[in-house]
Image: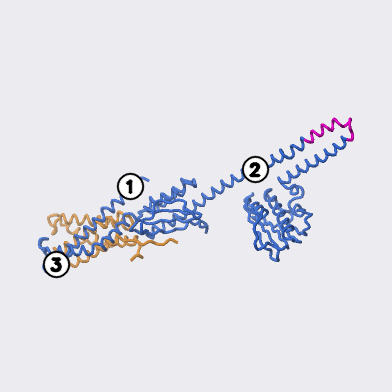
Amino acid sequence: MRRERLSSVLSGWLYRILFPFLMLWYVLVVAALVAVVVTWPDRPIGSLAEVPWWSHVIAVAVVVVTWSPVSAHVDGGVHQLAYGQRDDAYDVAGRVYRQLQSDPHPDELLPSVTTLLAETLALPYVEIEADGRVVTVHGAVPDGAAVIAIPLRHHQLTLGTLRVSARRRDWLSAADVHLLEDLARHVAVALHTARLATALQSSREQLVTAREEERRRIRRDLHDGLGPTLASLGLQLRVLQRTLRSDPAAAEQLAGELRTGVRQATADIRRLVYELRPPMLDEFGLADALRNLNPTDGLARTVTVPEPVPPLPAAVEVAIYRITAEALHNAARHAAATRCAVELTFGQDAVALTVTDDGRGLPETYLAGVGHHSMRERSTELGGTIDIGPADGGGTRVAVTFPMRSHD
Amino acid sequence: MAAMTRSTALKIAAVLSVLVALIGISLFDLPNLVLGADGSKDPFAIVIGSFASDVVALVAAYGAWRGQKWGAVLLIVVNAFWLVQAVGSLLFDSTLGEAVFASVMLVHHVVVISLCLWRERVVRAA
């Protein structure tokens, strides 16, 4: 930073010295040229004393008349020479790259880059906009200065905009803009990386949160459901033990109630297990589990699954199973469908599930409900995509794709 | 006017200055330096000064060719000095040839200074 400050100070000194020097020189040269013209018939002259006094009057008049345009031109040129010229673009670029590498924290990355650009390129105004909002700004636009916008692009994706303005009375040169465009590409990569880091952190937090919520739900189910049921069964068993000999009829009735209680506890355990992972997936495999889904909903269905089914990550199996169940449920309940086709195909890097029904399709004023949101969540949380829309021959088509490489 | 980049303008200024410096060294400085202080037809201080300014111009031209700020500034200073020489020649030299040469040099120095102060207009980014 000391080097940039020194450079800035030197630029200021250069501007303050060179402009008056050149204007003083201009006055002297005009005076001399006028003297040359007025003494031309008598040239060469022996000394400056031979120049008539009115020659200087003419020179003053010429200087007064031409002062404004000449001084404006010289001022602009000296200003750009002093402040606008970058002796070494690679040096500027190198500093920005080093800054991008040394300051990886997403919150500090963009402010530090704007400050660095403003200081190294001597720009009065640098702004970075991302996601439609100004993320960081350095300085202010001078009155009447042009602002140029350079898009921050990464892989055809526009992540934001870099806006800069030149100094007053100055323009950004083509070299300046090319340098800024080059730097903008690297800033875009850094921005993209920062976003990915933020998304990864958010994803980790979601995973931890989901795991904790799942644990809490299981704990609640065990504590509030199965626990009291088993405690009640224990008490009833004690009563049964006491009444078994003294009152066999009451004991028999109590044994019946106990059997109902045990059945209830077993059902609770089954439900708990099913919510963790559908048992059919382990008992029959994915293909047969899909064929046996909701056998009582009245839908005629065809299930097309290649055999043998390649091994899939457990999370993908569960997602396919639950999305299929939801799609079949929607077809039977909301679309009044009579037939449904479930197809599972395996590509090299992805597995695709398609559920097509012959129902009345999605209404024009369709709003995604809880079921559709659930399907979408299940696909996106595994990096997949989902498309819910009209089928070719009427009805509704749900198409889901899961990447397989990321689950290796 | 605005189509030319500052880098090109500095390169042209450098080439022009090198030409003039080489002409000055070969036609004026070296012959007078060879003759020495006693034999030189011009005041030897002027010969030394002219030679020094020509060497500085060559160094400045190198810097300007490389696009360096110091090169452009040095070229401006040297050409401003030469400008005074050219005007002096117009005033005090006697022959027509000298007057024509001084006039050409005067235009040259003004052009070089203008090229060193060349301004580029803003290019709208994509």
On-image quarter of the C terminus of chain B? bottom left
Residue A98 is at least partly visible in this image: no
Q: Which chain is blue?
A: A
The amino acid pointed to by label 2 is Glu
Magenta-colored span: A232-249
* Depth check, front residue: A232 or A135: A232
Q: Earlier in the sequence, mark 1 or mark 3?
A: 1
Q: Which chain is orange?
A: B
Res A338 → quadrant: bottom right
Kindly identify which numbered label has been placed on residue A213. 2
The amino acid pointed to by label 3 is Val
* Crowd rating for badge 2 (residues with CA inside 10 Å; few <14, some 14–19, many 20+): few
Q: Earlier in the sequence, mark 2 or mark 3?
A: 3
Mark 2 → mark 3, Cα distance in angstroms: 99 Å
Q: Is residue A243 magenta?
A: yes
* Secondary element at image label 2: helix
On the image, numbered disc 1 is attached to which residue? Answer: A6
Horizontal arrangement in the rendering, residue B53 relative to residue A140 (left or right): left
The amino acid pointed to by label 1 is Leu
On the image, numbered disc 3 is attached to which residue? Answer: A38
Horizontal arrangement in the rendering, residue A250 relative to residue B105 (left or right): right
Res A2 → quadrant: top left
On-image quarter of the N terminus of chain B? bottom left
Closer to the eye: label 1 or 2: 2
Count up the numbered dots.
3
Say if labels 2 and 3 share a chain: yes
Chain at tag 1: A
